[in-house]
Image: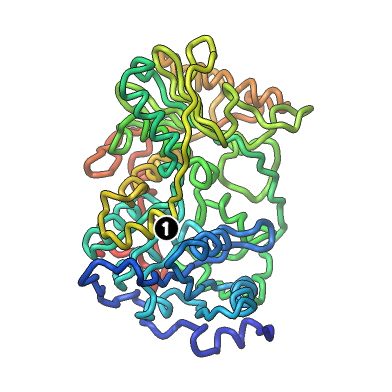
Amino acid sequence: MKRINRRTFLAGSVAAGTSLAMSGCNTQPAPYSRVRGANEDIRLAVVGMGSTIKIGGRGKKHIREFRELEGVRVVALCDPDSDILNEQVKKFHDRSEKVGAYADIRKLLEDKNIDAISVVTPNHWHALATIWGCQAGKDVYVEKPVSYNIREGRKIVEAARKYKRIVQTGLGSRASKALAEAIRYIRQGKLGKILVARGFCHKRRQSIGKVNGPQPIPESIDYNLWSGPAPMEPLMRKYLHYDWHWIWTTGNGDIGTQGVHQMDICRWALGQSQMAPRVMSIGGRFGYIDDGQTPNTQIIILDYKPAPLIFEVRGLPESKADSKLPTYRGIRVGVVIQCEGGYIASGASKVLAYDNNDKVIKQFEGSGNNYANFIEVLRSRKVSDQYTDILDGHISTALCHMGNISHRIGAERKPGQIREAIRGDKNSLEVFERFEEHLAANEIDPGKTPAVLGPALKMDTRRERFVEGHGLDRANELLSRKYRKGFVVPEKV
């Protein structure tokens, strides 16, 4: 395939994708008049290929997963980086498969030969791409976190319901038969009442480095389209791709990137269908000075009743001398649901029940496929058949946003001040003690490099708005954001 540069690419016919009005995608939905036949192919477009600079790219996984499903054809690809897009288009051509190529999702959504889209963009694009997809009559699979902020998540839910679209969340743990069985086991009272649900995201994150000034935007990228709903700011980091996760204008840190999976499992186990009534964060960015903004070490306390949800993020190794990652009861990335008579521990590969002496008493088996479930539901049109409906995705993502909001409006405090703030809460005190031990093992003195203590914020779970806590006005401002013209997440979807 002949290589084309950015200017040629954007000037092309189908790839340019800029003909829709910049006020948004107003294409009217084309609701299904009948259930799709078993022999009819689902025609799907993947929106967002992912970075080839530092990692493989989540979009490539979506292409592979959907292509392998019977009765599914990937018929279009979309990405504002022509190098990344061309690389994937070439693979289709090499297989003699026809595929459309678009820089702008708005042009893609005009194509009536597309039934569904899979949104694998950076976080700041998830909501708008999904809402526009619903408005254009497409069903949507949207990656986690489903939104950049809490208001966006609610607007996606409203759009899905209004336009009668199937909108599935990329929280694959809901497809796990082993986890579903473990949660049934808990609800049957086999381990007694739940005392606390703990989530863990212990993933090594290296420094992203520090630059001295604005960096050049790669020639292959349409930066206006890449920025979309986010401010079109100078690039103040070495890499545009992937490291957007650790910048507040585009990303949600590790709690939103990875932790939302485990947050969702914890909420599922607790049986909670709304946001937590109260949140507090303790955390910071420790171990290096770089251009990253989000915390790499964080505690989020979600005060559900009768059992709380406590989440821990750690991006540093176990210690300065040991590069392996820390664990809690053998879990590095996963959950521990502590009950009166034992606990459930779920990590990368196993879901086990233990007694209080750490003896395994039961192993749960079985897996599932979230991608396949999405396609099955596109045929049945039954939202109740979904593993991860958008409403679940919204609530679990919102818990991550709540924790980040507390952090962002917090202030640095000495360890003694933090202990005073959580005095009387034995679970929070215990996790903070381990937080301090972890930092000390990495030769970080919390007295000299204080953690940020976020305020305790009370949430009106019906209105999805904070109603009490220090910095209340700023907290509620962070429920949404200011959008650029042409890329506004609408109030009325």
Seen from this angle, which residue lies furthest right? Answer: 321
Residue 32 as seen in the image, left or right of residue 350: left
Q: Is residue 409 above or below residue 194?
A: below
* Colour scheme: rainbow
Estimate the x, y position of residue 292 in percent, counting from the top left.
Answer: 62, 48
Residue located 45% across and 83% down the image: 18
Location of residue 358 (image quadrant): top right
Mark 1 residue element = strand
Residue at image point 64% right, 58% down: 56
Q: Using the image as rendered, state which of residue 190 and residue 204 is in the foreground.
A: 190
| Residue 307 figure quarter | top left
In the picture, the quarter occupied by the C terminus is bottom left
The N terminus, quarter of image: bottom right
Q: For the point 68% across and 23% down, which residue is it?
A: 440
Residue nearest the observer in this picture, 468 or 270: 270
Q: Residue furthest top?
A: 357
- Could you classify mark 1 by the number of other residues whose Cα lies within 10 Å: few (under 14), some (14-19), or many (20 or more)? many
Which residue is label 1 attached to?
142
Q: What residue sits 66% from the left and 39% below the top?
A: 204
Q: Is residue 67 left or right of residue 164?
A: right
The relative height of residue 90 versus residue 480 in the rendered view (above or below) is: below
Q: Amino acid at mark 1?
A: Val
Q: Position of residue 300 (x, y in %)?
A: 46, 32
Residue 96 in percent (x, y) is at 59, 80
| Relative side of 335 to 151, left or right | right
